[in-house]
Image: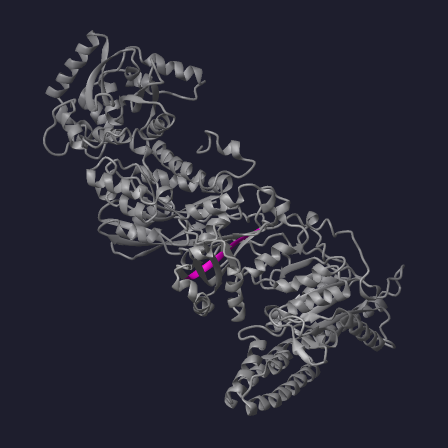
Amino acid sequence: MPAGTLTKQPKTPLLDPTSVAEDTVGQTWTGFAGKTWQVHKFGGTSVANADCYRSAASIVEEQLGIQHGNEASSPVNGNHQDHHKAQNHDCLAVVVSAMGGKPKTTDLLLKSVEAAARRDDEEVERVLKFVLDKHMTCLKDLFDNDQDQKELLQVVEKDLEDIHDILKTVSLMKWQASRISELVSGYGELWSARILSRLLQNRSVDRYTKKQQEKEHESSSLHEEADPVFHEFAFIDARRIIIIDEEAIQDGAVEWSMCQSKLEEMYQEETAKLQGRKEENIQLHFVVTGYVASNTEGVATTLQRDGSDYSAAIMGRLLKSTNITIWTDVDGVLSADPRRVPSAYAVAEVSYNEAMELAYFGAKVIHPKTMQPAISSNPQIPIFIRNTFNPKFRGTRIFTSSVTNMQNDSCVCGFSSIDHMALINVEGSGLIGVQGVAKRLFGTLESLGINVVLISQASSEHSITFATDEDSAEPARQAIQAEFQKELDQNRISNIDVNFPCSIIAAVGDGMKDVTGVSGRFFTALGDAQINVFAIAQGCSERNISSVVATSQSTRALRALHAAFRLSHTTVRVGVVGMTEYGESLLRLLEVQRRHLWDAFEIDLQVCTVAIDSHDTDIFRLKNENGDDSITLAAIREATKTSPERSDSKISFAFEASATGEIVKSSHGDLKPLLENLFRVDCAHHVIFDCTNDKEASVFHPEWLNAGVNVVTANVTGISGSKKIRDAIHAAETARGKLSAQYLREVTVCGGLPVISTIRTLLNSGDKIRRVDGIMSVAMSYIMFRVSPPPEIARSGKFDEECTKGAFHGDIGNGIGKACSFSQAVKEAVAMDLTEKDVSHDLSNEYAACVLMVLAKELGLDRNVTTEEIQKKSEKVVDLPDGKIMDHRVFEGTIDDMIQARVAAAAERGCVLRHVGSVDVATQSVEIKVVEVPNTHVFAVTPPSCECVRFFTHRHNPYPLVIQGPAAGADCTSSALLAELLNMMRSKVGPRMGILSRSNSSAFLT
């Protein structure tokens, strides 16, 4: 599959449908009237137009197993049976909301009441005409029979006349009474339920007639089939059944005994209507209006917000249904808001308690009151949340169990948030140990009708913090100030602070109580994302952890937490500077390893911007910043090959056959735009790879670090540069303590060899480093080996080849072990790309001096030394001519002869020449020398293009700790750069459970 777009597997959105409902599958119980019932509710978006009504009707028929004339049950989940589908003998109660769409019917009706109260007769007429036209259009599209259209339209027109008369009264009184608003707003459900019931009834008649005809034509068959079932769909006005006591509580309390009596009366009336019908095998189903109800006085009222869902739950309890299904426009209860967390998914199962917590904290898929009838029913009733527009998806089951109790690595089922909040803090010594303070405080708020969402108080009682909605913040502050004015005057209360805008982020999961370290993971994730927490609250049930953060950081917090608890991957936005050989190799490696890192660590390394070089550079970025695309090496090569020499040109490249990403090129004089292209406030992790060795790039390192972007660098010029740049980097990487962006510089010394990490490990473990020395320049390692190889070195290459059974074919036996001239060695090193662009940087010890400066800094010796001083005092192999060295032939003749003579002299003493750098802690000296080492010394036998570093420490005595290996080659360097980032991210994410050992293996980057 072409790289660029990562084809991501869903984060276990469903449990196996065959195992999810084990506690209900196979169980049967008798419901109302001795029958088995199911309740299905369709929201406004599910009946927004004629097509939606048809889809809803098809879903109802599929639940009955009668779609397309098939009386047998058919699966809706691929090869799995839909366990909550009704069987042939089941009865359905279908609850319907008013027509949705934009605008919604209910909103239009309420708007007409508001307009009437303002005596805006023109607006009233316009709104009511819009309502009529909306239903007329739907009816014409839905019914071919003019009679059906006419009858239903007459109902709507007559009701609109009644509404018009009511609104005249409102206009005369200029009074928008809540009772009138409830009466008018409930008409939409009446119309919608009539439309759906007529549609289902017509389709049932057509289907029954067809079955009867087929039966007559097949009367000569050998066996007689059972009479087809006629499904009767009766329109039911919920005001005939659902009775509430409006005085009991704010939303009204259901009078269950009265409702049950009303239901029985209604059922007897509807069954009586079926007597004498020609159909012999009639199965009765209800199509019920949602939202509307009656009070104990018989006056029409509504069930307020999410009333249709509540109607479905009430009907479920009254009918003793086996389940309640809410059909809406989302796939289920989501693990987070998908608009803010794109990787959010539908959770397979949540408990009632989890669903209520999520609903309270902003998850609008279901209201807490909807679950009350299902919970109080005996037996309790599972609630399914399903998508009308994706009916084959199983959705979410809300019942007694939860996935957080089934999966060891999923103690949290989801995250939600409440925005537009304010945090009020009352603080002062006068609160300590004083009884009645909390009563006075919250009593004052209660008298104003201010709702308190969250409360936090430390055990010292020095302060009380609570959260309320933003609009109530100032009235609350003024009321508290008035109540505690005496304490404020006496300085017993020091201040009343209001902080807004804030957001409350909540983690919800029943499984948290059984898992240690949940709070630690929660706040570590926020800390790693550099998010400040204002207040914390958690109940003893351990089902909810809530924290208050700045609204500007709420999206970032949600994404960080969602990833930290394994509910999604962790996205790392990546920028790459320098399309050198190292940069190209790194891009290729990121492309190849992207899927593996996703699977092993749930990390998505998304390359979002690339700078070709560090000066006068072309910078590329993804045009679609919210997608999953990642810039690839092929894309960059295509762009640089075909793009015209002008800024802001666009280049398209195919990530896969069905997807095309687009990158945008812009030309700049430096790297300033790179940070702007990379950084996004809603992403917690950013990194820039510096694959250059240019000072023009390293001057931006402090700026990137201060912006919270981690820097992984192969560029040694920054950390070994002037004292000013070194201090700026140090200040930036320590500015926020442990929350600071990290400056990862392992690759600046000996490429992929773990030199810096070894130094830090030794020092952190309490060892004392006395001296570090070694061959630290790849170019000089190769050149000195070629001009002065140890005797019989070819035998080592043959031995390696034999013992590895040919897996490694060393180059020592292929002529490399034979001495050559200095000019020839330089020529070969340049051809193999082992040197800097200007070989004089290597021969003058400029590069080696930079490396030693980095080591000196790690050992605390950089205060009194500079790179220039190290280079100036160093011993050069040869005296170099002025200017750049572009041709190896400048060394032919005199210099070759001089080097040859020195090599011969060393050989007479049983030695070879090697280029060695050292940092001596005891003498505070940093040196570079060309030294004679014995033929058997580790420096002598270090292969060409390899580096070797020795550590003389207090514990490693009498022999030094030696690190040796190849440090040249783009693949080695790019692997080391990626490994640096992974080591950092593993401390923040870590491998998934069950693959810890595999992801820790040395073959990880293979």
In the image, residue 1006 above or below residue 964: below
**Which of the 4 image quarters holds residue 410?**
top right
Q: Is residue 500 magenta?
A: yes
Numbered disc total: 0
Our reading of the magenta stretch's main secondary structure is strand
At a point 70% along the width and 61% down the height, the residue shown is 374
Q: Is residue 369 magenta?
A: no
Looking at the image, residue 575 sits to the left or right of residue 158; the answer is left
Looking at the image, residue 378 sits to the left or right of residue 347; the answer is right
Taking depth in this image into account, of 171 and 308 the one nearest to the observer is 171
Tell me, yes or no, if residue 203 can be seen here.
no
In the image, residue 667 above or below residue 696: below
At a point 16% along the width and 28% down the height, the residue shown is 871
Residue range of the region highlighted in magenta in the rendering:
498-508
**Which of the 4 image quarters holds residue 580?**
top left
Residue 438 position within the rendered picture, expressed as x and y whole percent measured from the top left: 52, 60
Looking at the image, residue 786 sits to the left or right of residue 117; the answer is left
Residue 474 position within the rendered picture, expressed as x and y whole percent measured from the top left: 43, 68
What colour scheme has been applied to the protein in the rendered image? Answer: one colour
In the image, residue 446 above or below residue 662: below
Tell me, yes or no, if residue 912 can be seen here.
yes
Residue 918 position within the rendered picture, expressed as x and y whole percent measured from the top left: 24, 22
Residue 818 position within the rendered picture, expressed as x and y whole percent measured from the top left: 26, 15
Image quadrant occupied by the C terminus: top left
At a point 56% along the width and 90% down the height, the residue shown is 173
